[in-house]
Every structure is written in structure tokens, then in C-alpha cells.
Image (tube, rainbow, N blue to C red):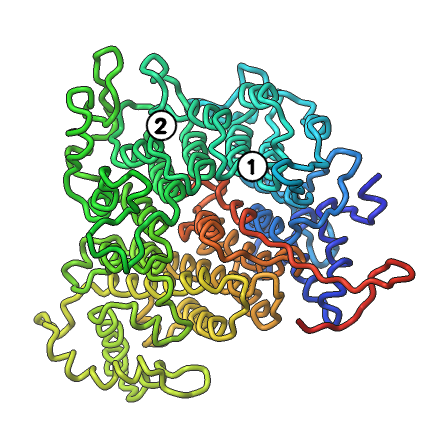
């Protein structure tokens, strides 16, 4: 067979990638180690120490508990494996593309025996989305579709795609496209979730145009929810920026708000709605389409109209905001032309919508008057048209007239940033300013500060500098001073004079500029802050700790987006220092660290975002020092490290060795938008979590991948030869 001929018994492409990349990394086994860390088809190494007093029954339970945590890491690795093996197949195999299994078993060190995971106590939908990611990772190995003028010269034909279709078809009575049905382990014929991911990968690689609309209809009517999501996003990615009306109709059919009143009662799963909305953003990218812009803007502030799909509203609203930014990508006025207070370029014909003012209201909160005034009597409480004259009311959620910023703020911030990306518009940047007093800090969620920093830096693109001083300048003065005072207070409480000064030093033993400034201002600042009767500072300590961590991480993520694929050494050094500071907060328990440490899960989230920022800068370089640091970060595997954290750590490793060292990342606005969608800094808690971000969107990074391959070939034999080259 094809896989035996290339000596790939695991069918995941890692073995052949190790061989092909030996010319790029000839002096060590870094690519072999990266493949080992991202392999999911072999049992995990399971070592559980046994105390003398532990019985056999308790020891078996301990092994199962440890194995469950290791399997949680295995389920999160396909995302990173897809980055590592993307484009690794040069010729299309004659047989169906094999998808490697997700091995939920452990290998005991003493006897080398295999211990299977007991899934009786696990959730029935634990492997649904990991299987989807596994299918995407396998499909991304295919070569990119070649363009011959305006036509696609594609070697992937409709016959081959249909040939890959699973033989088992889910009966209509067991379909899971609607939100009210769930996966049951007692079903006779289970849906193939990996095939949905395979279809999305075909779209990301430009091959899904081979399918006819009849084939698409068959997939949508007979597939599972993962198949629906995969086909919707795949079609949109395949036709990115084309405004294809046939694809648009398919996407709009899965958005209830765009359907006629007689179809308004259709029960479409929230994941399918979010995928369709994100697909609208990809399909109409950069077109400033009036109808879609108006719909997306109105939909962000929409209230729930019925009891269907009231869950996962955060991911749906986030998809709305991202889609709005993608449709109007880069349409904002330049800073030199914004003196007339017109934000959107007049040539787009959208100035009457007052997009920026309404998005700012979605960020800051208040009442949304624009939609009600425009719709008049046809607009009911929920924000949708009435059906047959009868308004619908949701009996589970009541939000009143005020805007729920917990839902609308993340998408609105990213929409503003994408619309005015690289424009330097100071007025728009001021809408995304961070709270500069402790009073205002209480009215903003701490995790939203990270998104604010990223969105603001998308606008002020030229102001980003790869220095520690620039990162510290992004932190408001009140937060910076309070954070420094926490360390000084801890130092005085334990009687270690100078410990705060030592903690402000960098790795070379020199005092950071920001740290020296804070120490000089400490005595002045400590007198300005009020104290309670016990002498403690009257500030919300946990809010300050969280804000500091999120703002620093958001600054690192902005650095990663600007310098993605460049290998900038200054950016590498700055982000590395931030990662080491976060590692110190996670691992150490000295007085200074305890005084400045936020909650464990916040540290893990910031670490995941920081390591992805590091890999964005060093994408495709396989930098050895960065790889060593990533191995240290991913080592811990306990209850505090969730599924999404493992996903971020695996993605960082895969991105560092993108395409086996033969790929890098683009830096155009559409590439930055794709990376922002993929690495949105809110990771899932469990493998079935789509509440804040649709997991399928994590694979949009493939749209920003650029192939870079330089080979030395023997002119006589035509074979590759090792020849050191410097470009």
C-alpha cells in the first residue's frame, strides 16, 4: 500500500517528515523529538509511583487517574500535528487517505504492558472534537491546489473525495445537526467525526471546489454536526474573498436570522451557526458588503428570542465580531485622513451605519438604540423580526434594555481592530484604551484586557516595538505601581531587604528600566495610596494581579502577530523573558511570587498565549533554544493543566516546526486576521467546550501558511544532496 511503501506504519506522516527534514536539521534530532511529542497513535508513557501502604485496588485507580490526564493531552495534540505535517504529501495517494487513530492507552515502564483507558466514567462526547481535529490534521498533509490563471488545476478530483467518504452512514433518525440531540453511546451506527475535519482541510487547501452542490447537500443532510461545521468552513475558506452566491446561500441557510419568518423555527446547533457566520466573514473578506455588514452589526446586539440555542452564545457573538471585521478588513481611514471624524472610508458606502460608534457601545455598555429606531415596530424584544405578527420571548434569559458586554465586547473589539488594521487611527485606538484607575478597572473583565491590548495594537501597528520597555508602557501606571508595591510589601513582611530589587532583575543580573523606575517611585506611590485600619493597601489585589498578567500577555501576542515568521531575535528575547516570569509564578512559592501570583488557571492561559506568541515569531525555524523552553512549559500534566492548555502547548511546538521547517507565516492583513481567528486567546476547558470560541476555527492558520523550500539537487541523479546554504 501507499503507507507501507513510504514506511509510515503510524499513518500520521511523522516518520516520513523526519526523513525529509533531515536535510534542514542535520546535526541533531530536534524534528524527531517534535514528532514524538505530537504523536497520538502510540500509547503514552505511564509512570505512577507506588507507596508501600497503597493497595492493588487503589493503585489501579491511581493509574487510571494519571492515564486520564495523559489522554487529555493526547486528545489535544492533533492541532499541533497538523501544523507540523502540513503539505508533507507531494503526490496524491491512489487509495483513501488514512487517518491515524487517537490512542487512549498507556505503556507501563516495568513490563512494557499496555493499559487501556477506562472510558466508563468519561463523557460520551469526549472524543468528538478531537476526532474532528485529527481529520483536519490528516487532510492538511495534502498539497495545495495549484492555480492556472483564474482556474484551479486540481489533482484532487470529486471521485477521490467521494472515495474517501466513510462507508457507515448515520441514519436520519440519528442525525445530530440540531441542538436538541446528543451523541449516545448506544447508537448502532456512530457518525465519523474525523471525516468532517477532513472536508474542512480540503477547503483550507483549496480542493473542495471539486464537489458539486448535490454532494454538499448530501453531506449536510446525512452528516453529523462536525460534518456540517467542516463543510461550511471548508467551502468558505475555499472561496475566500470571492462572494460566491452559491456558497453564500449554503451559509445563510444555517443562520436563522437570515431566513424568512416561516423558517425561523428551524433548530440549528449553535456550533453550526457560529461556523456559518465565520464562513460569511471568509467568503466576503475585504468586500465591505453592505447587506452582510448591516446584518452582522445588528446581530451582535441581538437578544435571545426563544429557548433554542441559548448556550454557547459567547462563541456565536465572537464569530459575528470576527466576521464583521473580516468583511470590512482594512476599510478604515488612515490616521492622516481621519481629521473629518469619518472612520470608515467613504468609498465603501457604510458611513451612515456609524459602525465605530455602535461597536464602542458594545464594548463600553449602555443601551442599544440604533437597531430599535431603524426597525421600528417590527423589532421585538429579542432583536429579531416577529413571526406572523407574534413576538417570541425567551423564557430562560432576560437581559433587559442594557447591552450584555460579556457577550458583545470581545467580538466588537476584534471587529474594530480588523477594520482599522495598520491604519494608526488614534481616535479608534482611544476607544480601546485600558482603564487607568482602580475604579474603572472594576468595570472591565480582566480577560478582556488581553483582547483590548491586541485589538488596539492592530490599529497602532507601527507603534509595536520588540522591547521590554514597550511592554511595560502598555500597562497603566496605577496597575504597574500597585503590582510593584505588592512585592515591596511582601519583602517587608518577611524581613528580606532587597528581595524586591532582586526580583526586578533580568537574566543577566541587570536591573530592568521599568523595575528601577518602580523602585524609585515606590516611596512616593505608597504614600498616595490609601490604607485600611490594618495598614493594607485598599486595592483589589486579585484584580491587579490578573490585569498585569493579561496585559503583558496581550502585548506579547501583539509582538507575535507583527513579527510572525521573521525570527526577530529581539522579539524572541522579550517573549522568552515573559514566559520565564510566568513559569516562575507557576512553579515557585517565594514571598514575592506569592504576592504577585494570580490564579493558577490564569497563569496557564497566559503561558499558552505567550508560547504561541513565541512560535509565531519563530515559525518554521525550529529554533533549538525556543524548543527547549517549550518542552519545559509542556512538561507539567496535572489537574491544573486543562485540555485547552495542552492544545496551546502542542500548537506552539507544531508551529515552531511548521511544515517540517519548510513553511512560514504570511504578514499581510488577511494573514494576520487568519492567525487571530486561530489563536484567539481563550482556550477550551474540556474537549467538548465550544462556549467562548468554536474549536474548528483553530485551523484557520492554514490560510496564512506560506511554503518556503530551497533544495540542492544533484544534476546527474536528480536526488537531493546535503549542501549548507545561507540566504
- Residue 509 locus on image (x, y percent): 42, 87
Q: In this view, does 189 lie above or below 434?
A: above
Q: Mark 1 points at which residue?
A: 238
- From the viewer's perspective, tell me whether residue 67 is left or right of residue 290: right
Q: In which quarter of the image is residue 294?
A: top left
Q: What element carries label 2?
A: loop
Mark 1 vs 2, N-terminal side: 1
Between tags 1 and 2, which lies in front?
A: 1
How many badges with numbers are in the image? Answer: 2
Residue at 74%, 58% (x, y): give it: 18
- Residue 174 locus on image (x, y percent): 54, 18
* Residue 380 shows in the view: yes
Residue at 36%, 86% (x, y): give it: 511
Q: Mark 2 points at which residue?
A: 309
**What crowding class fits label 1: few (fewer than 14 Cα within 10 Å), some (14-19), or many (20 or more)?**
many
Residue at 87%, 62% (x, y): give it: 715
Amino acid at each position: 500500500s501507499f503507507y507501507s511503501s513510504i514506511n509510515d506504519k503510524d499513518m500520521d506522516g511523522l516518520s516520513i517528515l523526519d526523513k525529509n527534514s533531515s536535510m534542514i536539521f542535520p546535526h541533531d534530532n530536534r524534528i524527531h523529538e517534535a514528532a514524538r511529542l505530537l504523536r497520538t497513535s502510540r500509547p503514552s508513557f505511564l509512570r505512577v509511583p507506588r507507596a508501600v501502604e497503597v493497595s492493588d485496588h487503589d493503585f489501579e485507580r491511581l493509574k487510571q487517574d494519571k492515564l486520564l490526564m495523559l489522554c487529555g493531552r493526547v486528545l489535544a495534540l492533533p492541532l499541533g500535528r497538523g501544523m507540523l505535517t502540513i503539505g508533507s504529501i507531494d503526490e496524491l495517494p491512489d487509495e483513501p487517505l488514512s487517518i491515524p487513530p487517537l490512542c487512549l492507552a498507556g505503556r507501563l515502564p516495568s513490563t512494557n504492558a499496555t493499559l487501556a483507558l477506562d472510558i466508563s466514567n468519561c463523557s460520551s462526547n469526549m472524543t468528538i472534537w478531537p476526532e474532528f481535529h485529527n481529520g483536519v490534521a490528516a487532510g492538511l498533509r495534502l498539497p495545495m491546489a495549484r492555480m492556472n490563471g483564474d482556474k484551479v488545476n486540481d489533482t484532487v478530483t470529486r471521485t477521490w473525495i467521494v472515495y474517501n467518504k466513510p462507508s457507515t452512514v448515520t441514519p436520519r433518525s440519528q442525525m445530530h445537526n440540531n441542538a436538541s440531540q446528543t451523541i449516545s453511546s448506544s447508537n448502532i451506527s456512530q457518525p465519523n467525526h474525523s471525516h468532517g475535519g477532513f472536508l474542512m482541510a480540503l477547503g483550507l487547501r483549496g480542493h473542495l471546489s471539486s464537489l458539486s452542490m448535490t454532494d454538499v447537500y448530501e453531506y449536510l443532510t446525512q452528516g453529523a454536526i462536525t460534518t456540517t461545521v467542516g463543510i461550511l468552513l471548508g467551502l468558505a475558506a475555499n472561496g475566500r474573498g470571492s462572494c460566491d452566491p452559491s456558497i453564500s446561500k449554503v451559509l445563510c441557510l444555517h443562520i436563522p436570522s437570515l431566513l424568512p419568518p416561516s423558517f425561523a423555527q428551524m433548530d440549528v446547533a449553535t456550533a453550526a451557526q457560529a461556523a456559518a457566520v465565520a464562513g460569511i466573514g471568509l467568503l466576503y473578506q475585504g468586500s465591505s458588503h453592505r447587506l452582510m455588514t448591516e446584518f452582522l452589526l445588528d446581530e451582535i446586539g441581538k437578544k435571545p428570542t426563544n429557548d433554542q440555542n441559548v448556550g454557547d452564545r459567547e462563541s456565536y457573538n465572537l464569530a459575528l465580531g470576527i466576521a464583521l471585521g473580516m468583511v470590512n478588513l482594512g476599510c478604515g481611514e488612515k490616521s492622516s485622513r481621519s481629521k473629518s471624524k469619518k472612520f470608515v472610508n467613504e468609498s465603501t458606502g457604510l458611513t451612515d451605519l456609524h459602525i465605530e460608534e455602535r461597536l464602542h457601545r458594545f464594548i463600553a455598555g449602555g443601551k442599544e438604540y440604533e437597531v430599535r429606531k431603524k426597525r421600528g415596530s417590527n423589532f421585538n424584544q429579542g432583536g429579531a423580526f416577529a413571526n406572523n405578527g407574534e413576538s417570541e420571548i425567551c423564557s430562560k434569559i432576560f437581559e433587559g434594555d442594557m447591552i450584555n458586554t460579556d457577550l458583545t465586547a470581545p467580538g466588537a473589539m476584534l471587529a474594530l481592530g480588523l477594520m482599522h488594521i495598520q491604519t494608526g487611527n488614534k481616535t479608534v485606538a482611544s476607544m480601546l484604551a485600558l482603564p487607568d484607575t482602580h475604579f474603572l478597572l472594576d468595570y472591565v473583565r480582566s480577560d478582556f484586557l488581553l483582547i483590548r491590548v491586541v485589538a488596539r495594537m492592530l490599529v497602532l501597528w507601527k507603534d509595536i516595538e520588540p522591547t521590554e520597555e514597550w511592554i511595560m508602557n502598555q500597562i497603566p501606571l496605577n496597575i504597574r505601581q500597585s503590582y510593584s508595591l505588592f512585592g515591596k510589601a511582601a519583602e517587608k513582611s518577611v524581613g528580606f531587604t532587597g528581595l524586591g530589587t532582586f526580583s526586578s532583575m533580568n537574566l543577566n543580573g541587570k536591573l530592568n528600566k521599568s523595575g528601577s523606575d518602580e523602585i524609585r517611585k515606590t516611596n512616593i506611590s505608597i504614600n498616595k495610596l490609601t490604607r485600611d485600619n490594618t495598614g493594607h493597601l485598599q486595592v483589589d489585589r486579585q484584580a491587579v494581579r490578573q490585569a498585569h498578567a493579561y496585559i503583558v500577555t496581550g502585548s506579547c501576542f501583539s509582538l507575535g502577530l507583527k513579527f510572525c515568521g521573521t525570527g526577530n531575535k529581539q522579539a524572541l528575547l522579550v517573549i522568552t523573558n515573559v514566559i520565564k516570569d510566568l513559569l516562575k509564578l507557576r512553579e515557585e512559592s517565594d514571598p514575592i511570587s506569592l504576592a504577585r501570583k494570580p490564579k493558577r488557571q490564569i497563569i496557564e492561559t497566559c503561558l499558552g498565549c505567550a508560547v504561541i506568541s513565541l512560535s509565531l515569531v519563530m515559525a518554521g525555524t525550529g529554533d533549538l533554544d525556543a524548543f527547549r523552553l517549550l518542552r519545559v512549559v509542556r512538561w507539567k500534566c496535572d489537574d491544573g493543566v486543562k485540555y485547552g492548555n495542552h492544545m496551546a502547548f502542542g500548537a506552539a511546538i507544531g508551529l515552531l516546526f511548521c511544515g517540517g521547517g519548510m513553511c512560514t507565516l504570511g504578514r499581510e492583513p488577511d494573514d494576520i486576521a487568519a492567525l487571530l481567528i486561530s489563536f484567539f486567546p481563550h482556550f477550551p476547558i474540556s474537549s467538548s467546550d465550544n462556549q467562548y470560541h468554536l474549536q474548528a476555527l483553530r485551523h484557520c492558520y492554514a490560510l496564512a501558511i506560506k511554503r518556503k523550500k530551497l533544495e540542492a539537487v544533484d544534476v546527474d541523479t536528480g536526488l537531493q544532496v546535503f549542501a549548507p546554504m545561507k540566504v
